[in-house]
Image: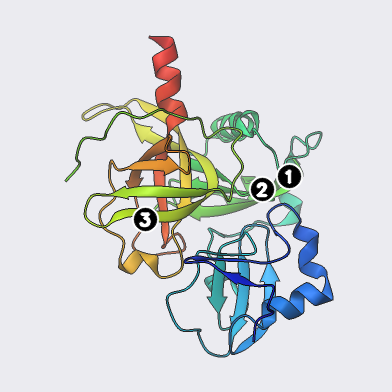
């Protein structure tokens, strides 16, 4: 049974510690004991700074909480790449070398300068990429084509690892205050506007720069600042069409507008949206 200090909220479980602000609390024996007693069948724990992973001999009954001790929980039978709710691609050999070793890229508040370094490097070596995602302690680069000489790809950038993957009914929104995603703390709760079921809660996790075509029939390409929301384990099965729907903060401000929610692959259960920063910048430039 869980400790009496545990408070069960409708979709959140709060504990005497918050792993978002105090990740070291995860390693304290008394906290590990408390976490392991939350769900029957637990046989282990892991944490990567974004998710609290419960290894289970059997899955706990649904509905599952949106957060435990401040982080979204993820239930898995064992550790493995296929059981991690994030985008982990392929890593290249260490002998490939690294770029910008004089920068510490870990836990950057504003990583946009790092994006331009990565984008320009791949442009210089002639490798076409379509998106760069920042995951705090590694960068995921989406390659447009599979025919790439992997020996040319850097193994690290700014002292963090690089992972490689391959790219393989809109309704009008109410005008609300736009709020920038840059500088905002990840792990904040956000709400996806759903016309049929009300608001769907998720967690703001990752930002990226995604390459898009400027317009229909155009060959011009642009890089768009993108936000990624984690909607909860197995949420993809019940998530309605999301294109164009507003993404709200707890204060009711618009953080961005949804573009798509992958239905399969490693980013299943996630939702991608254009960050409000793109619209704010355009308004300022008018």
Place of residue 59 in the rendered image (x, y in percent of width and height, measured from the top left):
50, 85
Q: Residue furthest top?
A: 286
Q: Around disc 3, counting alpha carbons within 10 Å, would you say few (fewer than 14), some (14 to 19), or many (20 or more)? A: some
Q: Residue at x 51, y 54 (%)?
A: 165
Q: Nearer the viewer, residue 206 or 186?
A: 186
**Residue 206 vs residue 217: left or right?**
right
Quarter of the rendering containing residue 14: bottom right
Secondary structure category for the residue under label 3: strand
Tell me if label 3 and label 1 are in contact, CB under 8 Å: no
Residue 130 seen anywhere in this rendered image of the structure: no
Q: Which of the image's four quarters has the N terminus?
A: bottom right
Tell me if label 2 and label 1 are in contact, CB under 8 Å: yes
Q: Around disc 2, counting alpha carbons within 10 Å, would you say few (fewer than 14), some (14 to 19), or many (20 or more)? A: some
Tell me: residue 247, above or below residue 224: below
Q: Nearer the viewer, residue 34 or 123?
A: 34
For marks 3 and 2, give the one nearer the viewer. Answer: 3
Q: Residue at x 39, y 16 (%)?
A: 283
Of pointers 3 and 2, the one earlier in the residue sequence: 2
Say which mark, if any, is on residue 106: 1
Residue 55 seen anywhere in this rendered image of the structure: yes
**Residue 199 vs residue 141: left or right?**
left
Q: Residue at x 72, y 52 (%)?
A: 21
The span from disc 3 to disc 1 (Cα, nearest Å) is 30 Å
Q: Around disc 1, counting alpha carbons within 10 Å, would you say few (fewer than 14), some (14 to 19), or many (20 or more)? A: some
Instruction: Check disc 3 and report the residue beneath it.
Output: 200
Say which mark, if any, is on residue 136: 2
């Amino acid at each position: 049974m869980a400790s009496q200090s545990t408070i069960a909220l409708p979709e959140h479980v709060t504990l005497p510690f918050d792993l978002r602000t105090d990740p070291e609390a995860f390693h304290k024996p008394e906290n590990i004991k408390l976490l392991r007693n939350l769900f029957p069948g637990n046989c282990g724990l892991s944490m990567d700074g974004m998710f609290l992973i419960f290894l289970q001999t059997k899955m706990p009954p649904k509905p599952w909480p949106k957060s435990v001790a401040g982080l979204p929980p993820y239930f898995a039978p064992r550790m493995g790449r296929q059981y991690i709710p994030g985008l982990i691609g392929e890593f290249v050999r260490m002998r490939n070398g690294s770029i910008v070793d004089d920068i510490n890229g870990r836990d950057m508040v504003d990583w946009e300068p790092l994006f331009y370094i990565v984008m320009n490097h791949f442009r210089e070596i002639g490798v076409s990429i379509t998106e760069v995602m920042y995951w705090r302690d590694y960068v995921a680069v989406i390659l447009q084509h599979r025919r790439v000489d992997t020996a040319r790809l850097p193994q690290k950038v700014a002292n963090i690892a690089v992972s490689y993957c391959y790219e393989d009914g809109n309704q009008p929104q109410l005008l609300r205050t736009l709020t920038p995603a840059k500088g905002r703390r990840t792990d904040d709760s956000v709400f996806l506007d759903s016309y049929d079921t009300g608001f769907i809660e998720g967690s703001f996790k990752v930002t990226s720069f995604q390459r898009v075509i400027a317009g229909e029939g155009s060959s011009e390409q642009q890089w768009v600042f993108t936000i990624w929301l984690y909607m909860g384990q197995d949420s993809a099965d019940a998530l309605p069409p999301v294109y164009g729907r507003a993404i709200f903060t707890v204060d009711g401000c618009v953080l961005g507008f949804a573009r798509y929610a992958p239905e399969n692959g490693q980013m299943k259960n996630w939702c991608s949206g254009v960050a409000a920063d793109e619209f704010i910048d355009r308004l300022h430039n008018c």
